[in-house]
Amino acid sequence: MVSASDSQLSSLHVFLIGSWASHYFYMKNTNSKNECFIPLQKLRKSSAFLVDDSCVFGVKILKITVTSQKKDVVVQEKATTVQNLFVQNKGLIKGTYTWTMDNYLELDSDFIRSPTFEVGGHKWCVGMYPHGDRNITDCISLYLYLEDTDDLSGESGKAVDLTLSILDQKNGKHFTMTTGIFVFRGASGWGWPWFLSLKKFKDPSGGYLVGSSCVVKADFTIVGSSNVG
């Protein structure tokens, strides 16, 4: 347990080997100000990042423990992990799934999930925390999950370019979040804890919630695979 006066900050430094590209993620905020690490088209066209249909990412984690008491600040540095990402230029697998929920206002569960659907020979589902994930109480949290992991070892995964949307059923002005490449491995899920504020979602002038109905859409492309080297 961490008290209000004590905290742990972690910075996640992600870099792409070739010409230098990097982002820092501060774990206290759980997200980066940069939603896209590197544009997919730039990666595909780069002779520095992409060599023989392969590129290499590295991750360096720095954990800092901060305390209000008169103690030394403890800095723990973990070894760099190199992840090999294989991005395809052809034969990309695209998937689209639309999930219509007719009973949002009657939900009494902290977490709900869509029916399972199949893309690229794997089973997926969309998961929603209708009132927020963990300590988040003012936003909808939305994720895509990989369920079928029979042929994926703990050190391999699927590289996915992901877009999640809540559709505007009145005005057609859909609320959409798009990312760069996520790597799904094991029973993993990726998405946004702060996807859409509940205030905006329930605003009657918008069309995100009509009666008790909302529509969630997942558009994603399997752009390659990944393993830890």
Image: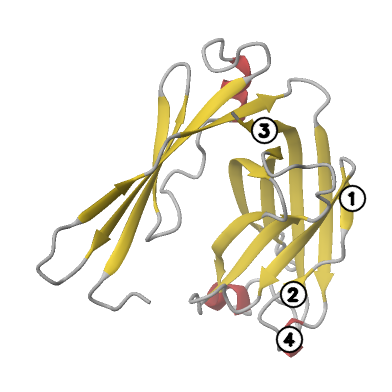
- Residue in the picture at 73% in, 20% down: 89
Badge 1 vs badge 3, beta-carbon distance below 8 Å? no
Badge 1 vs badge 4, beta-carbon distance below 8 Å? no
Residue designated by label 4: 107
Question: Residue 1 versus residue 113: which sits nearer the camera?
Answer: 1
User: Which element carries disc 3, helix, strand or loop?
Assistant: strand
Sequence order check, earlier mark of 1 and 2: 2
The image shows residue 110, relative to residue 18, as above or below, that is: below
Residue designated by label 1: 118
Left or right of 63 in this view: 43? right
Question: Residue 152 versus residue 208: which sits nearer the camera?
Answer: 152
- Residue in the picture at 72% in, 32% down: 225
Amino acid type of the residue that numbered disc 1 sits on in the rendered structure: Glu
Residue designated by label 2: 112
The span from disc 1 to disc 3 (Cα, nearest Å) is 20 Å
User: Which element carries disc 4, helix, strand or loop?
Assistant: loop
Badge 4 vs badge 2, beta-carbon distance below 8 Å? yes
